[in-house]
Amino acid sequence: MKRSQAFSFGMAFGLLLPSCSGSPNQNTTPFGEHRPAAIVKAAALHLGEDCAVGGYRSCRSQICGHFAANPEAGYFCTKSCAREFDCPHDWACAQVFPSSDGLLCIPPSDWHARIAMLRSGAVK
């Protein structure tokens, strides 16, 4: 191999090497487990309220569900249920994980954070 060809090959290889370093692209944020920004000492949020900041500890029910495609939005306090009547108006009681107590109240897709009234008229 001639010296000029070896130099060209070395330069091309040297320019490619940093892009193959295995380090993550700094422009993307991986999606993972939601980690609340605040530590909550007392649960104060009712069913249907936004629990993104304090997580499950901020909900009276101790259940904060994620109900949106966007990982940064759609966190609402929810509760376990056995049937539709146990949930707020327009919410569904649906199986969310495989167990006998895996049913949760699921808000409608257009839900905006606010206190949700149960069908019985109670606030949970």
Image: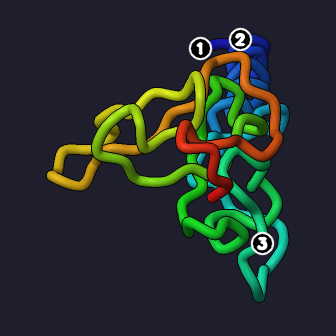
Left of 79 or right of it: where is 108? right
Q: Is residue 60 visible?
A: yes
Q: Residues within 10 Å of mark 1 (few under 14, many from 20)?
A: few
| Residue 1 - label | 1
Marks 1 and 2 sit apart, C-alpha to C-alpha, by 6 Å
Q: Which residue is at a point 65% across and 74% down the rendered structure image?
A: 57
Q: Earlier in the sequence, mark 1 or mark 3?
A: 1
Q: Position of residue 22 (x, y in %)?
A: 60, 42
Marks 2 and 3 sit apart, C-alpha to C-alpha, by 71 Å
Q: Is 4 drawn above or below residue 67 in the view shown?
A: above
Tag 2: amino acid = Gln
Q: Is 122 drawn above or below residue 30 in the view shown?
A: below
Q: Is residue 22 visible?
A: no
Q: Position of residue 6 (x, y in %)?
A: 69, 20
Residues at marks 1 and 3 touching, judged by CB atoms closer than 8 Å: no
Which secondary structure, mark 1? loop
Figure quadrant of residue 60: bottom right
Instruction: Give whichever of 21, 92 is nearer the camera.
Output: 92
Q: Is 77 drawn above or below residue 10 in the view shown?
A: below
Residues at marks 1 and 2 touching, judged by CB atoms closer than 8 Å: yes
Q: Quadrant of the C terminus?
A: bottom right
Tag 1: amino acid = Met
Residue receiving disc 3: 44
Marks 1 and 3 sit apart, C-alpha to C-alpha, by 75 Å
Q: Residue furthest front?
A: 120
Which secondary structure, mark 3? loop
Q: Position of residue 89 (x, y in %)?
A: 59, 28
Residue receiving disc 2: 5
Q: Residues within 10 Å of mark 2 (few under 14, many from 20)?
A: few
Q: Which residue is at a point 28% across and 45% down the rendered structure image?
A: 82
